Image (cartoon, grey):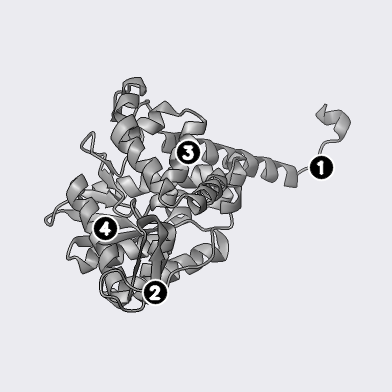
Amino acid sequence: MRCIKCGEKAIMELPRHNSAFCKPDYLEYFETQVERVIRRRRTFNRDDRILIGVSGGKDSLSLWHVLARMGYKTAGLHIHLGIGEYSSLSYEKTLRFSEQHGLTLFTVDLAGKYGMNVTELSRTLRRAPCSGCGLSKRYILNREAYERGFDALATGHNLDDETATLLGNILHWQIGHLARQSPVLPSTGEKLIKRVKPLYTLTERETAAYALLHGIDYILEECPNAWKAKSLLYKDALARIEAESPGAKQRFLTQFLEAAQARLQVGADDYVLRDCVRCGQPTTAELCAFCRMWQQATERAEKRKRYRETASGREMPTLQERF
């Protein structure tokens, strides 16, 4: 297997492009793909300040690495979710990366700032961890980007992530979500920061190769809550299709963005943004979803605490007394 550009021994084969690259040419290919997305999608310019959501995984660290190499003004934001050793290791990887490359890192501790970590929040609300986790991350990323004066918020979502999301939204016909699924979500208000996904044309395998070739030390373990996510099922199904028809995932997403999304926007939910009465962040209701969730969690936690305090000071009621 030879590099299609220089003829030297290739270290990375890309069946979907019917090509293979040596190390230098692969790294150039990767960075060219990112630069092409930035240019074609007009994600941001050289004067913009870009906040990158970094988890400690290969995608977010690779994104931070490539944007910093290209000379963009970047900083990272890591949210410590409190998911046991996984979160501690994720933070360590992120902090070490920022220190090694002289990059600015901001950190938000979920439990320290809001009173509960993801595990405690899930138990209190009696809902799947991914639900509260995802909502919290979206809210915090946007709020921190706005309050710190950034022009764009970048995340490391790759082609596999985007096609899995697309398939899930189609299977459930989430018209509103389909209409808004894009590598660039422009700001629709002063407090809603533009969200961009510069890696959306690159696969998870390609991003992992970039990280390994650059010696980026990222967390290998999957989130312990990930096994419950439907996205893994969708990724597996798409991977099987891709194996039989290289390039299928890219065509699936590209054709959706170019041919179908604009038509779906007609059926998208209409909404009017207003400021949340509690936190001031944009919402379509009086109280934003984040504040509603944390209000419910706090009330339930306080109710349980009062019950335990009351129960500890007297004998527990018998079954007959309860019913």
Residue 159 appears in the picture as rendered: yes
Q: Secondary structure at mark 1?
A: loop
Indicate which disc, 2 or 4, sits on the residue closer to the N terminus. Answer: 2
Kind of residue at badge 1: Glu
Any mark on residue 315, and which? Answer: 1
When the figure is inspected, residue 257 is found, relative to residue 81, above or below; the finding is above
SS at mark 2 in the image: loop
- Residue at 44% x, 51% y: name it: 160
Q: Which residue is mark 4?
A: 33
**Badge 1 or badge 3: first in the primary sequence:** 3
Q: CA distance from mark 2 to mark 3?
A: 31 Å
Report the Cα–Cα distance between label 1 and label 2: 70 Å
Between label 1 and label 3, give the one nearer the viewer. 3
The numbered mark, 2 or 3, whose residue comes first in the sequence reads: 2
The quadrant holding residue 107 is bottom left
Cα–Cα span, label 1 and label 4: 68 Å
Q: Amino acid at mark 3?
A: Leu
Q: Nearer the viewer, residue 251 or 199?
A: 251
Q: Estimate the x, y position of residue 31 in percent, counting from the top left.
A: 25, 63
Whichever of labels 1 and 2 marks the residue nearer the N terminus, that label is 2
Place residue 18 in its image quadrant. Answer: bottom left
| Quarter of the image where one finds residue 192 | top left
Establish if 139 lies above or below 268: below
The mark lying in front, picked from 1 and 2, is: 2
Identify which residue is drawn at 86% across, 33% down: 319
Q: Which residue is mark 2?
A: 11
Q: Going by the picture, which residue comes out furthest to the left?
A: 47
Q: Position of residue 200 (x, y in %)?
A: 34, 51
The residue beneath circle 3 is: 167
Which residue sits at x=59%, y=43%? 128
